[in-house]
Image: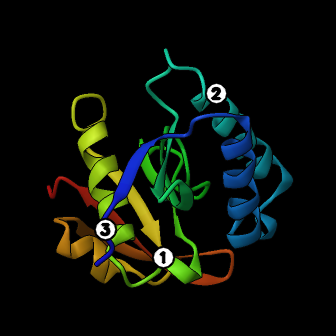
Amino acid sequence: MTTGIEISELRDMQEAGLAARWIFDAWARFESDETWQANRRDIELALNPTVQMPKFFAARVDGEVAGIASIVPHDLPIRPALGPWLANVLVQPQWRRRGIGGKLVQCMMDYARPIARPLYLYTFDRADLYQRLGWQVMEADRYLGRPITIMRFPAA
């Protein structure tokens, strides 16, 4: 477990650009250009302090951005009726297995509690992490040719 983790909203365009690069490299390069453009708009809009959603947060260790997460109105194109979503949970490889992902998710759940209930997410491979944090599996499906698990919080 890493101590000294600070989690707060993205601070500036430099952090927003970093988040955009990470999101593109991890997922968006496999999605449609329309979906990527929506992601970019969400990142830019999230920098506005008066906007509650979309909102992007960063986990920092000694000032270095180690991970990101967001709350967005829409995230899974094959489920347009569901939302809002916990999305873009990403911890850089050198910071993984230190509890940062769980802290980011918990921070986003706390942030969303007064503005967004229920909250949804989909994951390719981390349903176990989310279940430990109280998320309920809704269903399995496929997206971008890969299996996904769609989850909900709070559990129904």
Quarter of the rendering occupied by the N terminus: bottom left
Amino acid type at circle 1 is Asp
Q: Position of residue 125 (x, y in %)?
A: 46, 84
Nearest to viewer (mark 2 / mark 1): 2
Provide the secondary structure element on which disc 3 rests. Answer: helix
What numbered label is drawn on residue 45?
2
**Residue kind at label 2, given as amino acid type:** Leu
As drawn, is 98 to the left or to the right of 43? left
Say which of marks 2 and 3 sits in front. Answer: 3
The disc placed on residue 102 is 3
The residue sitting at 77% across, 51% down in the picture is: 36
SS for callout 2 = helix
Which residue is found at the position 22% from the left and 74% from the top? 131
Question: Which disc number belongs to residue 141?
Answer: 1
Task: Tell me how far mark 2 sits from mark 1, CA to CA.
Answer: 30 Å
The disc, 2 or 3, on the residue closer to the chain's N-terminal end is 2
- Which of pointers 2 and 1 lies earlier in the amino acid sequence? 2
> Where in the figure is residue 20, as x and y percent of width and height?
72, 52
Residue 11 position by quadrant: top right
